[in-house]
Amino acid sequence: MSGNLPAIPGPSVLPDVRADYRADGTVALVRVPAEGNTSSFALGGVALAGAVAVFALSRSSLIVFGVFLLFVAFWQLGRAGWKTYQRRTLSDAELVLPRLPLRMGEPMSVSYSQRRTDRSNITALSAVLSCTEWVEYQQGTTTSSQTHKLWEQPLPQAIADPLGDAELLRGTWQLRLPPELPPSFSAPHNSITWRLTIHVAVQDRPDISNAFVLPVTPEVVRDLR
């Protein structure tokens, strides 16, 4: 069954993620390869045509505008090309967890899988767990924001899943969120975000990363008296 996290009475401070709740009790998070490259190609083409037209007029007053259009064109065309490369190399990325939300200090095993869509040589899989804080604040009439990395840790792979020519890439890692760090928090001007980022190393091509946002609640303290 697919859906968002189960509803919690009152306002929730957890990030909103789409999750697939399975019959065996596990939960899957899915990252779909970047979409929308058609609109990026179209916007980039329009911006490039506009820049050419501006430079063809040879008016100094329009040079800044022409440079801006050229920047937009290269940005959108590059973005569209990167999305196309991602989709042609790998399909949907899936991360399976034993439960959601996760709890601070609770050890667990998580597994990743992703199917190849071409014969690219995948040389390595690695995972990094991170916690970042985002803050938005007012300085006079100016609104500013900052992002701080509170913690980051590469994860040792628990099972050495073979790569080679396997059509389905697999990786398994042991996960434990340090209880001394803050849990997930999402508010209009402040947030704490936990992410598990899977890096796929592709021989002679740019590497591909899939970042999964993890909803995390505080550690459960048991009274053993």
Image (cartoon, rainbow, N blue to C red):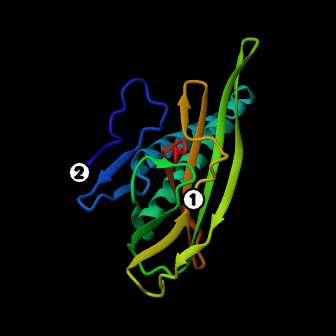
Q: Amino acid at mark 1?
A: Arg
Coordinates of residue 217 in the picture (x, y in percent): 51, 42
Which residue in the protein does label 1 denote? Answer: 176
Front residue of this view, candidates 61 and 139: 139
Q: Can you say whether 114 is above or below 196 in the image?
A: below
SS at mark 2 in the image: loop
Mark identifier at residue 13: none
SS at mark 1 in the image: loop
Coordinates of residue 40 in the picture (x, y in percent): 46, 46
Q: How far apart are the two marked residues, 2 and 1, measured between alpha carbons?
A: 26 Å
Q: Residue at 52% of width from left, 82% of height from top?
A: 160
Q: Residue at 52% of width from left, 44% of height from top?
A: 223
Coordinates of residue 171 in the picture (x, y in percent): 48, 73
Q: Amino acid at mark 2?
A: Met
Q: Can you say whether 139 is above or below 159 in the image?
A: above
Q: Residue at 67% of width from left, 46% of height from top?
A: 180
Mark identifier at residue 1: 2
